[in-house]
C-alpha cells in the first residue's frame, strides 16, 4: 500500500461525516438548521412553521436552501465549525422513507439519534438505529424539545436501554423542572450553563452564562430547590450510571446523551462542540485488498446512492459517491471496478436547488455527485487507475412492502421490462420473480411506499409504460437456507415463495408471528434477513 501523506491526514482528521436519524417530527430539520446557524453558514434561522406549509412539495433540505439561499446539496450539507469540516448526510423524512434512507447510513462515520422528549424512542428511529448498530458506527443521542413537558431524563435513559439495547451516558443534564428547563449541567467540566431566551423560534444564537456548579450565584438564580435536585441527580448518575468509556461508544455499546431544544437553541452549542470532539473522523474501510486507510494517497470511493432527476427537463442520473481515501481532483481518471472501465471525473457536482456547483477538490469523508451515464450501481467502487479492489458489499435491506406489477399495455412489454431492470440496478426497488406462476409480472419489494410511487412515475415518464400494480399482503421477506424453493415449506403458500435477482429463494410473510410459526414448523430450514451469498 502506498504511503500516507501528512496534509491528507490533516484533512481527514478535521472531517466529521454523520447522519441525523429520527422519527418524523422529532425536529431533524430544525436541528439541522440550528447546526448551520451555529456553524455560521446562516445568520438567521427561519421559522419552521413557514417551511412546514409546503413541506410535502419539496424535500426539507431543498426548502432550507430556497429560503436561506445557501448551498445545500440534495444529499449532503457541508459547513465548517472551529476547525472541523462537517458533512451532514440527508436521511429523508417520513414521506421519503425508502432504501435510500438506509443506504445513506453506509456513507456516515457516526449518527446522531434525535429523540422527542415526550415521545421517546419511536418506530422509525428504531429501524435506523439498528442499521447504524449493524454497521458498528458510534451513535450520539440528542433529546429534543426540552422546552416542553416530557418524560424524565432517567425514564428516557431506561427506555433507550430497554428498547434499543444500548446504554446511555448523559454528557449533560437538564437543569430545571419538566417543561421549564433553563440550562444544562456539563458533567465533564462540572459546569452549569444557563440559557437566555433565543427570541422567536431561536432565530439567533442563544446567549448563555457559564460557571461552576458550586458557584452560589447559580443556586440563587435557579432557586435552591432546583439546584439541590440537580446535585442529587448528578450524585445518582455518578454512583449508579455507567462510566464514560470511549471504546464502548466506538463499539456502539454506549451512546453519549445530550439534552436540549432545537427550537429555542438551548443545549445546541454544547452538543455540537462535544459531539465534534468525540465523533470519529473518517476511518479505514474494508476492501478486497484489506483495510483502505483514508490518508492513503490513492483515491478511492464508493457509490451509495443513485438519484434520477425527477424533472423531465433534465433526465440525468446522478451517482453520489463517498470518498474513502486520497484526494479527489476534478478531471482525474479513475477505474470503475465493476465495469473495468476508466472514467474521467470531469464534471463532479454538488447539487444545489437552483444551480450546480462544480467541485474542484474533495477529501475522504466528502460526498460528491457524478453524472451517471447508466453505468453505476449501488455499492460500486472507484479507485485510482491501476488499482482494482472493491469495497465490502452493501447489505441488502429486507423489503417491507410488496406489490405485483405488470405492464398495462402488453405492447409496452419491452419498455416495461427494461424499466424494471434499470430501476432495480439503480437500487430504486428490489425485484423478485415467481417462475412457476404464469404471466409476465414481477414482485416488487420496497421499504417505503414512496418507492412504489417513484416506480410508477418513472416507468410512465421515462419508459412510456403504464403499470398495473396490486399491493400484496406481505410485510417481511426472508431468504431461505436448506430448500431451493421447489419443495413445499410447511405453512407457506407456493405463491409466497419468490426468487431474487441471484435466483435465491425468498419466502414472504405477512407478520412476525407467521414467520415464527413457519420457523417452528420447519426446523431443518433457516430464514435469513438478508442473503448469505451475494
Ligand atoms: P422533522 O424534520 O424531524 O420532521 O421535524 P421538524 O424540524 O420539521 O420539526 C417538527 C415540529 O417540531 C415542528 O413543529 C417544529 O417547530 C417542532 N420542534 C422542533 N424542535 C423543537 C423543540 O426543540 N421544541 C419544540 N417545542 N418544538 C420543536 P410544527 O408544529 O410542525 O411547526 P411549528 O408550528 O412549531 O412551527
Image: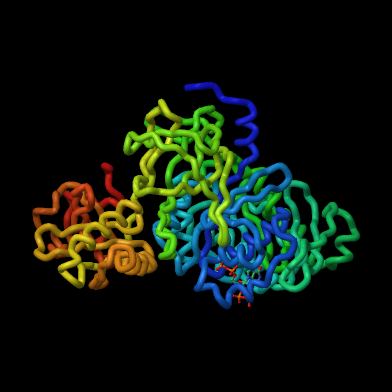
User: Residue 48 lies in what quarter of the image?
Assistant: bottom right
Compared to residue 265, the image places residue 236 above or below, namely above
Q: Quadrant of residue 147?
A: bottom right
Residue at (77% x, 66% y) in the render: 182
Specify whether residue 463 is in view. Answer: yes
State which quarter of the image contains the C terminus. top left
Instruction: Name the side, left or right, on which 20 lies relative to 424.
Output: right
Residue 452 in sight here? no
In the displayed image of the protein, which residue is found farthest to the bottom?
53
Q: Nearer the viewer, residue 410 or 114?
A: 410
| Rendered position, 74 above or below 473 | above
Task: Specify the color scheme.
Answer: rainbow
In the image: residue 209, left or right of residue 257: right
Q: Report x, y in % for residue 361.
A: 58, 39
Q: Of all residues shown, which one is farthest toward the front?
A: 313
* Count of marks placed on residues: 0
> Which one is nearer the viewer's eye here, 59 or 491?
59
Q: Quadrant of residue 450?
A: bottom left
Please tell me whether residue 102 is drawn above or below residue 381 in the rendered image.
below
Residue 47: x %, y % from top left: 67, 72
Instruction: Tell which of 126 and 473 is nearer to you.
Output: 473
Q: Position of residue 72 (x, y in %)?
A: 59, 57
* Residue 124 percent coordinates (x, y): 46, 64
* Apparent side of residue 337 relative to residue 74 in the rendered image (left or right): left
Picture quarter with ligand 1:
bottom right
Going 81% across and 66% down the picture, which residue do you hit? 196
- The answer to whether residue 222 is left or right of residue 296 is right
Amino acid at each position: 500500500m502506498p504511503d500516507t501523506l501528512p496534509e491528507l491526514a490533516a484533512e481527514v482528521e478535521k472531517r466529521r461525516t454523520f447522519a441525523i436519524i429520527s422519527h418524523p417530527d422529532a425536529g431533524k430539520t430544525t436541528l439541522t438548521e440550528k447546526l448551520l446557524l451555529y456553524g455560521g453558514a446562516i445568520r438567521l434561522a427561519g421559522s419552521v412553521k413557514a417551511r412546514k406549509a409546503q413541506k410535502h412539495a419539496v424535500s426539507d433540505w431543498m426548502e432550507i436552501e430556497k429560503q436561506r439561499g445557501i448551498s445545500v446539496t440534495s444529499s449532503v450539507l457541508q459547513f465548517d465549525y472551529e476547525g472541523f469540516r462537517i458533512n451532514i448526510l440527508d436521511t429523508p423524512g417520513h414521506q421519503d422513507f425508502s432504501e435510500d434512507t438506509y443506504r445513506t447510513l453506509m456513507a456516515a462515520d457516526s449518527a446522531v439519534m434525535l429523540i422527542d422528549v415526550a415521545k421517546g424512542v419511536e418506530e422509525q428511529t428504531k429501524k435506523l438505529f439498528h442499521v447504524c448498530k449493524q454497521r458498528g458506527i458510534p451513535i450520539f443521542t440528542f433529546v429534543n424539545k426540552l422546552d416542553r413537558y416530557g418524560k424524565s431524563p432517567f425514564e428516557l435513559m431506561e427506555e433507550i436501554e430497554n428498547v434499543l439495547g444500548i446504554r446511555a451516558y448523559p454528557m449533560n443534564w437538564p437543569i430545571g423542572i419538566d417543561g421549564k428547563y433553563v440550562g444544562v449541567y456539563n458533567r465533564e467540566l462540572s459546569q452549569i450553563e444557563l440559557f437566555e431566551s433565543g427570541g422567536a423560534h431561536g432565530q439567533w444564537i442563544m446567549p448563555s452564562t457559564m460557571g461552576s456548579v458550586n458557584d452560589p450565584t447559580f443556586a440563587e438564580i435557579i432557586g435552591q430547590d432546583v439546584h439541590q435536585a440537580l446535585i442529587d441527580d448528578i450524585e445518582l448518575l455518578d454512583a449508579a450510571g455507567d462510566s464514560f468509556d470511549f471504546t464502548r461508544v466506538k463499539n456502539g455499546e454506549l451512546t453519549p446523551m445530550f439534552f436540549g431544544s432545537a427550537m429555542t437553541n438551548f443545549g445546541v452549542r454544547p452538543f455540537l462542540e462535544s459531539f465534534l470532539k468525540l465523533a470519529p473522523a473518517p476511518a479505514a474501510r474494508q476492501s478486497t485488498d484489506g483495510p483502505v486507510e483514508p490518508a492513503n494517497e490513492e483515491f478511492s470511493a464508493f457509490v451509495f446512492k443513485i438519484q434520477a432527476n425527477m424533472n423531465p427537463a433534465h433526465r440525468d442520473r446522478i451517482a453520489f459517491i463517498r470518498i474513502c481515501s486520497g484526494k479527489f481532483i476534478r478531471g482525474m481518471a479513475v477505474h470503475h471496478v465493476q465495469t473495468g472501465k476508466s472514467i474521467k471525473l470531469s464534471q463532479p457536482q454538488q447539487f444545489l436547488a437552483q444551480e450546480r456547483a462544480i467541485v474542484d477538490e474533495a477529501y475522504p469523508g466528502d460526498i460528491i455527485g457524478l453524472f451517471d451515464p447508466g453505468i453505476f450501481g449501488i455499492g460500486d467502487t472507484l479507485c485510482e487507475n491501476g488499482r482494482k479492489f472493491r469495497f465490502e458489499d452493501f447489505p441488502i435491506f429486507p423489503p417491507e412492502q410488496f406489490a405485483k406489477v405488470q405492464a398495462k399495455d402488453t405492447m409496452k412489454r419491452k419498455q416495461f421490462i427494461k424499466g424494471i431492470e434499470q430501476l432495480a440496478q439503480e437500487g430504486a426497488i428490489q425485484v423478485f420473480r415467481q417462475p412457476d406462476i404464469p404471466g409476465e409480472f414481477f414482485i416488487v419489494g420496497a421499504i417505503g411506499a414512496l418507492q412504489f410511487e417513484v416506480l410508477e412515475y418513472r416507468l410512465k415518464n421515462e419508459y412510456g409504460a403504464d403499470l398495473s400494480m396490486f399491493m400484496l399482503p406481505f410485510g417481511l421477506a426472508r431468504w431461505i437456507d436448506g430448500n431451493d424453493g421447489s419443495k413445499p415449506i410447511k405453512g407457506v403458500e407456493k405463491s409466497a415463495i419468490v426468487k431474487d435477482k441471484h435466483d435465491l429463494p425468498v419466502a414472504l410473510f405477512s407478520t412476525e408471528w407467521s414467520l415464527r410459526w413457519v420457523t417452528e414448523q420447519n426446523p431443518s430450514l433457516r430464514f435469513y434477513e438478508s442473503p448469505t451469498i451475494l
